[in-house]
Amino acid sequence: MQSVKSMQPLKYGQTDLVYRKGFFAFLCGAVLMGVLLGTIAYCCSNADFLYKLSLTQSDFIKSRAEMDHSQILTGSLTGTTIFLAAAFLCGLCPLGQPAELALLVFRGMGIGLTLSQLYGTYGRSSVPYAMGLILPGAVISTLAVVIAVREAMSLSGVYLGISLSDRAENGLVETVKLYGTKFMVLEAALAAAAGADCLCSYLFIGHFG
Protein backbone atom coordinates (compact mmCIF):
# COMPACT_ATOMS: atom_id res chain seq x y z
CA MET A 1 0.00 0.00 0.00
CA GLN A 2 1.37 3.40 -0.94
CA SER A 3 2.29 5.78 1.84
CA VAL A 4 0.44 9.08 2.16
CA LYS A 5 3.64 10.94 1.24
CA SER A 6 4.11 8.95 -1.98
CA MET A 7 0.53 9.77 -3.01
CA GLN A 8 1.00 13.55 -2.74
CA PRO A 9 0.97 15.42 -6.07
CA LEU A 10 4.28 16.56 -7.47
CA LYS A 11 5.08 20.17 -6.66
CA TYR A 12 7.07 22.76 -8.56
CA GLY A 13 9.40 25.09 -6.68
CA GLN A 14 9.02 23.61 -3.20
CA THR A 15 11.05 20.56 -2.18
CA ASP A 16 13.01 19.89 -5.34
CA LEU A 17 16.69 19.04 -5.20
CA VAL A 18 17.41 22.19 -7.19
CA TYR A 19 16.32 24.35 -4.24
CA ARG A 20 18.55 22.66 -1.71
CA LYS A 21 21.48 24.50 -0.22
CA GLY A 22 24.54 24.29 -2.44
CA PHE A 23 22.80 23.57 -5.75
CA PHE A 24 22.84 27.22 -6.74
CA ALA A 25 26.60 27.20 -6.14
CA PHE A 26 26.83 24.13 -8.39
CA LEU A 27 25.05 26.00 -11.18
CA CYS A 28 27.36 28.99 -10.74
CA GLY A 29 30.26 26.53 -10.89
CA ALA A 30 29.00 25.39 -14.30
CA VAL A 31 29.30 28.99 -15.50
CA LEU A 32 32.83 29.28 -14.08
CA MET A 33 33.71 26.00 -15.80
CA GLY A 34 32.51 27.56 -19.04
CA VAL A 35 34.68 30.63 -18.41
CA LEU A 36 37.68 28.33 -17.90
CA LEU A 37 36.89 26.37 -21.06
CA GLY A 38 36.51 29.60 -23.03
CA THR A 39 39.88 30.81 -21.76
CA ILE A 40 41.54 27.49 -22.60
CA ALA A 41 39.93 27.50 -26.06
CA TYR A 42 41.38 30.95 -26.70
CA CYS A 43 44.85 29.98 -25.46
CA CYS A 44 44.91 26.77 -27.52
CA SER A 45 43.58 28.27 -30.74
CA ASN A 46 45.84 28.74 -33.75
CA ALA A 47 47.14 32.12 -34.86
CA ASP A 48 44.73 32.42 -37.80
CA PHE A 49 41.72 31.90 -35.56
CA LEU A 50 43.02 34.39 -33.01
CA TYR A 51 43.64 36.96 -35.75
CA LYS A 52 40.07 36.62 -37.02
CA LEU A 53 38.74 36.78 -33.47
CA SER A 54 40.85 39.85 -32.82
CA LEU A 55 39.37 41.62 -35.85
CA THR A 56 35.89 40.67 -34.74
CA GLN A 57 36.45 41.93 -31.22
CA SER A 58 38.08 45.12 -32.48
CA ASP A 59 34.99 45.71 -34.61
CA PHE A 60 32.91 45.10 -31.49
CA ILE A 61 34.84 47.73 -29.54
CA LYS A 62 34.59 50.17 -32.44
CA SER A 63 30.90 49.51 -32.97
CA ARG A 64 30.20 49.95 -29.27
CA ALA A 65 31.88 53.34 -29.42
CA GLU A 66 29.68 54.35 -32.37
CA MET A 67 26.41 52.99 -30.97
CA ASP A 68 23.92 55.11 -29.11
CA HIS A 69 22.50 53.92 -25.80
CA SER A 70 19.31 52.50 -27.28
CA GLN A 71 21.28 50.29 -29.68
CA ILE A 72 23.53 48.98 -26.91
CA LEU A 73 20.50 48.32 -24.72
CA THR A 74 18.65 46.45 -27.48
CA GLY A 75 21.66 44.38 -28.52
CA SER A 76 22.56 43.38 -24.99
CA LEU A 77 18.98 42.54 -24.04
CA THR A 78 18.43 40.49 -27.19
CA GLY A 79 21.58 38.44 -26.67
CA THR A 80 20.77 37.49 -23.07
CA THR A 81 17.06 36.95 -23.76
CA ILE A 82 18.02 34.15 -26.14
CA PHE A 83 19.49 32.22 -23.18
CA LEU A 84 16.41 32.95 -21.09
CA ALA A 85 14.06 31.77 -23.84
CA ALA A 86 16.09 28.61 -24.36
CA ALA A 87 15.97 27.84 -20.63
CA PHE A 88 12.21 28.45 -20.60
CA LEU A 89 11.61 26.01 -23.45
CA CYS A 90 13.94 23.39 -21.98
CA GLY A 91 11.97 23.57 -18.73
CA LEU A 92 8.89 22.31 -20.59
CA CYS A 93 10.75 19.11 -21.52
CA PRO A 94 11.01 16.17 -19.08
CA LEU A 95 14.60 15.49 -20.22
CA GLY A 96 15.69 19.10 -20.52
CA GLN A 97 18.20 19.12 -17.64
CA PRO A 98 21.36 18.39 -19.69
CA ALA A 99 20.53 21.15 -22.18
CA GLU A 100 19.75 23.54 -19.33
CA LEU A 101 23.12 22.88 -17.75
CA ALA A 102 24.82 23.25 -21.13
CA LEU A 103 23.33 26.75 -21.44
CA LEU A 104 25.30 27.83 -18.38
CA VAL A 105 28.53 26.37 -19.73
CA PHE A 106 28.02 28.12 -23.09
CA ARG A 107 27.27 31.38 -21.31
CA GLY A 108 30.50 31.08 -19.36
CA MET A 109 32.49 30.19 -22.47
CA GLY A 110 31.35 33.38 -24.17
CA ILE A 111 32.49 35.46 -21.22
CA GLY A 112 35.82 33.63 -21.02
CA LEU A 113 36.53 34.05 -24.73
CA THR A 114 35.67 37.74 -24.65
CA LEU A 115 37.81 38.56 -21.63
CA SER A 116 40.74 36.50 -22.93
CA GLN A 117 40.57 38.16 -26.32
CA LEU A 118 40.47 41.64 -24.84
CA TYR A 119 43.51 40.82 -22.73
CA GLY A 120 45.34 39.35 -25.74
CA THR A 121 44.54 42.31 -27.97
CA TYR A 122 44.92 45.28 -25.66
CA GLY A 123 47.42 43.99 -23.09
CA ARG A 124 47.65 43.89 -19.34
CA SER A 125 47.01 47.60 -18.89
CA SER A 126 43.52 47.22 -20.33
CA VAL A 127 42.42 44.52 -17.86
CA PRO A 128 40.70 46.91 -15.40
CA TYR A 129 38.82 48.57 -18.25
CA ALA A 130 37.91 45.21 -19.80
CA MET A 131 36.57 44.02 -16.45
CA GLY A 132 34.62 47.23 -16.04
CA LEU A 133 33.23 47.03 -19.56
CA ILE A 134 32.20 43.37 -19.54
CA LEU A 135 31.67 42.11 -16.00
CA PRO A 136 28.93 44.27 -14.39
CA GLY A 137 26.31 43.53 -17.03
CA ALA A 138 27.60 39.97 -17.49
CA VAL A 139 27.36 39.17 -13.78
CA ILE A 140 23.79 40.47 -13.47
CA SER A 141 22.57 38.73 -16.63
CA THR A 142 24.40 35.49 -15.81
CA LEU A 143 22.87 35.32 -12.34
CA ALA A 144 19.46 35.78 -13.95
CA VAL A 145 20.20 32.96 -16.38
CA VAL A 146 21.40 30.74 -13.51
CA ILE A 147 18.11 31.32 -11.67
CA ALA A 148 16.22 30.64 -14.91
CA VAL A 149 18.04 27.34 -15.34
CA ARG A 150 17.24 26.41 -11.74
CA GLU A 151 13.53 27.06 -12.38
CA ALA A 152 13.69 25.14 -15.66
CA MET A 153 15.32 22.17 -13.93
CA SER A 154 12.59 22.21 -11.30
CA LEU A 155 9.79 22.12 -13.88
CA SER A 156 11.61 19.51 -15.97
CA GLY A 157 11.77 17.38 -12.84
CA VAL A 158 8.02 17.70 -12.38
CA TYR A 159 7.36 16.66 -15.97
CA LEU A 160 9.81 13.77 -15.66
CA GLY A 161 8.15 12.60 -12.46
CA ILE A 162 4.74 12.69 -14.11
CA SER A 163 6.08 10.79 -17.14
CA LEU A 164 7.45 8.02 -14.93
CA SER A 165 4.42 7.86 -12.63
CA ASP A 166 1.48 5.51 -13.00
CA ARG A 167 -0.73 7.93 -11.06
CA ALA A 168 -3.22 10.26 -12.70
CA GLU A 169 -2.14 13.90 -12.42
CA ASN A 170 -4.11 17.11 -12.61
CA GLY A 171 -3.22 19.71 -15.22
CA LEU A 172 -0.25 21.99 -14.71
CA VAL A 173 -1.86 25.23 -15.85
CA GLU A 174 -1.24 27.06 -12.56
CA THR A 175 2.27 25.65 -12.35
CA VAL A 176 3.16 26.89 -15.84
CA LYS A 177 1.62 30.29 -15.03
CA LEU A 178 3.87 30.60 -11.98
CA TYR A 179 6.82 29.44 -14.07
CA GLY A 180 6.09 32.08 -16.71
CA THR A 181 5.72 34.81 -14.08
CA LYS A 182 9.14 34.03 -12.67
CA PHE A 183 10.66 34.28 -16.13
CA MET A 184 9.02 37.66 -16.66
CA VAL A 185 10.73 38.88 -13.50
CA LEU A 186 14.03 37.47 -14.76
CA GLU A 187 13.54 39.30 -18.05
CA ALA A 188 13.29 42.52 -16.03
CA ALA A 189 16.63 41.60 -14.44
CA LEU A 190 18.11 41.18 -17.91
CA ALA A 191 16.84 44.65 -18.79
CA ALA A 192 18.71 45.97 -15.76
CA ALA A 193 21.83 44.12 -16.95
CA ALA A 194 21.46 45.73 -20.37
CA GLY A 195 21.24 49.11 -18.67
CA ALA A 196 24.48 48.31 -16.83
CA ASP A 197 26.06 47.50 -20.21
CA CYS A 198 25.06 50.94 -21.48
CA LEU A 199 26.55 52.66 -18.45
CA CYS A 200 29.77 50.62 -18.59
CA SER A 201 30.19 51.31 -22.29
CA TYR A 202 29.87 55.03 -21.60
CA LEU A 203 32.45 54.85 -18.79
CA PHE A 204 35.04 52.46 -20.22
CA ILE A 205 34.85 52.15 -24.01
CA GLY A 206 37.08 55.17 -24.59
CA HIS A 207 40.00 53.47 -22.83
CA PHE A 208 40.44 50.94 -25.67
CA GLY A 209 42.52 52.00 -28.61
Image (tube, rainbow, N blue to C red):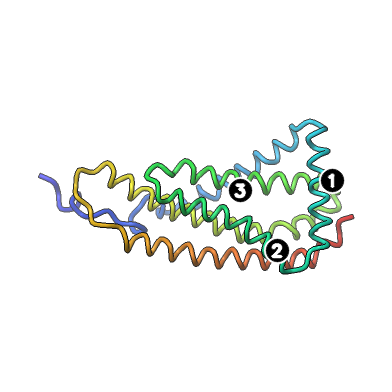
Q: Residue at x 77, y 67 (%)?
A: 68
Across and down, in percent, residue 162 comes to 28, 47
Callout 1: few (<14), some (14-19), or many (20+) C-alpha neighbours within 10 Å? some
- Foreground residue, 117 or 55? 55
- Amino acid beneath label 3: Arg
Q: Residue at x 62, y 58 (%)?
A: 78
Q: Which residue is mark 1?
A: 121
Numbered circle sitting on residue 197: 2
Q: Which residue is mark 3?
A: 107
- Amino acid beneath label 2: Asp
Give SS at disc 3.
Answer: helix
- Amino acid beneath label 1: Thr
Numbered circle sitting on residue 12: none
Across and down, in percent, residue 178 comes to 38, 64
Q: Quadrant of the C terminus?
A: bottom right
Q: Vertical placement of 95 versus 151: above or below?
A: above
